[in-house]
Image: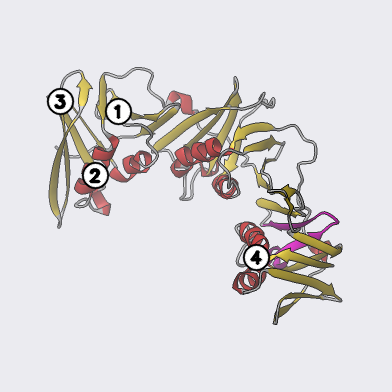
Amino acid sequence: MKILCDREKLREGLAVVNNVIPGKSTKPVLENVCLVATIDAIEILGTDLECSVRYRIPISSGAGSGELKEPVVKVLEPGIAVVPARVTLDFVRDLSGDEVAITTHDNNCLIQSGDDKCELVTVDPDEFPVISSFGDAPTLSVQGGSFTRLVNRTVFAAAREAGRYAMHGVLCEIDDGMLKLVATDGRRLAFSSVECQSRPVDRSRPAIVPTKGMQLFCRVITDPLEQVQLHFMENQVGLKTKNAEIFARLIDGEFPRYAAVIPKESANYIEADPETLTKKLRLVANVTGTEARAVRMRFNDGTLELFGQSVGRGEAHARMDVAFKNGPAEIAFNPDFVLDGLKNCEGGVLKLEFNEKTSPGKFTLGENYVYIVMPITVDA
């Protein structure tokens, strides 16, 4: 293999692929990236067997501003090289030249720019896992910015600690022209949906995508106006952008029946300014400790009073104006859970609905965006 490549383009590709490379693995070959040079592009491949990346740097020679652009890639000799992922990225990143030359000979790979060079020991390409490819598979089209917003609205609510395996991912459903995402850890649940930009692909059952996979999908979306393609397979889901194809193995398990958790009717209905509530909630939460992470909310006479306290720290109070229906009401939440949802609130008004202080709180934080938080019982 012998290629010349724009250094910054190569660095960008290596950085994306390194997101899935394990620092240490029982299979050492997974700590490497696979460079594939063809007549019209360089592909950078990486995987941890749960998530995989195929990043493509094409030869760009189209006309721009009336002039012929210099190619980003020049493939002098096609070939394959499997090289250490982290070292390759670090070396390319620290080079000062604009162009990088990569040449392989015997079991070595020479990376050079100007007077700076690095020679790496390569791995047998036959040992590197096979990475999936989209090909001509049927796909679902969604605007990149809309997909990223959808993931940000939900992924934070997925479970992190050991427990029910299915909760460690985000549920994806395709229904009536809408892509729906749901995440929960058993104490809170985030649900959001977005209209698909093309006719949805038929899928008979929902898919649970690992949190890491969802976050990786968002990292490769650089243009919010670009239409990205989703492809659901039997055991994995793929996302395709202009330069990258990402694949994540689906979680095999039964996701909770989330529809039963979302209240259909509520006795108490409150509207509040999300920015003000965020400030007041943080203020009061400062005195709460890890042993009693709770903020009490009391609604009465067009105002919301917030109370927080803990042994050894003291107590805090705050007040703000709200609009609400029904009489006086009270409920308590873990402030961290509420603040997580408020970070993604869109618009100037949030809505909170609940029946009793022991029933779930339903936060409406934007169009097609519902966040459910279970209350906390505190002493009077």
Q: Nearer the viewer, mark 1 or mark 2?
A: 2
From this view, report whether residue 109 is shown above or below residue 276: below
Badge 4 crowding class, 10 Å Cα cut-off, few under 14, some 14 to 19, many 20 or more, is: few
What kind of residue is marked 3? Answer: Gly
User: Marks 4 and 2: CB-CB under 8 Å?
Assistant: no
Numbered tag placed on residue 279 in the rendering:
2
Between marks 2 and 3, how big is the CA–CA gap? 18 Å
Q: Secondary structure at mark 1?
A: strand
Between marks 4 and 2, how big is the CA–CA gap? 43 Å
Q: Which residues are magenta?
A: 27-47
What kind of residue is marked 2? Answer: Lys
| Observer-nearest of 361 and 279 | 279
User: Marks 2 and 3: CB-CB under 8 Å?
Assistant: no
**Left/right of residue 279 with respect to residue 198 in the rendered view:** left
**Left/right of residue 355 with respect to residue 200 in the rendered view:** left
For disc 1, the marked residue is 352
What kind of residue is marked 1? Answer: Leu
Q: Main secondary structure of the magenta part?
A: strand
Residue 26 in view: no
On the image, the x and y values in percent for residue 31 come to 67, 66
Q: Secondary structure at mark 3?
A: loop
Numbered tag placed on residue 302 in the rendering:
3
| Observer-nearest of 163 and 246 | 246
> Residue at left 84%, top 57%?
38
For disc 4, the marked residue is 25
Q: Earlier in the sequence, mark 2 or mark 3?
A: 2
Q: Nearer the viewer, mark 4 or mark 1?
A: 1
From this view, report whether residue 287 is shown above or below residue 198: below
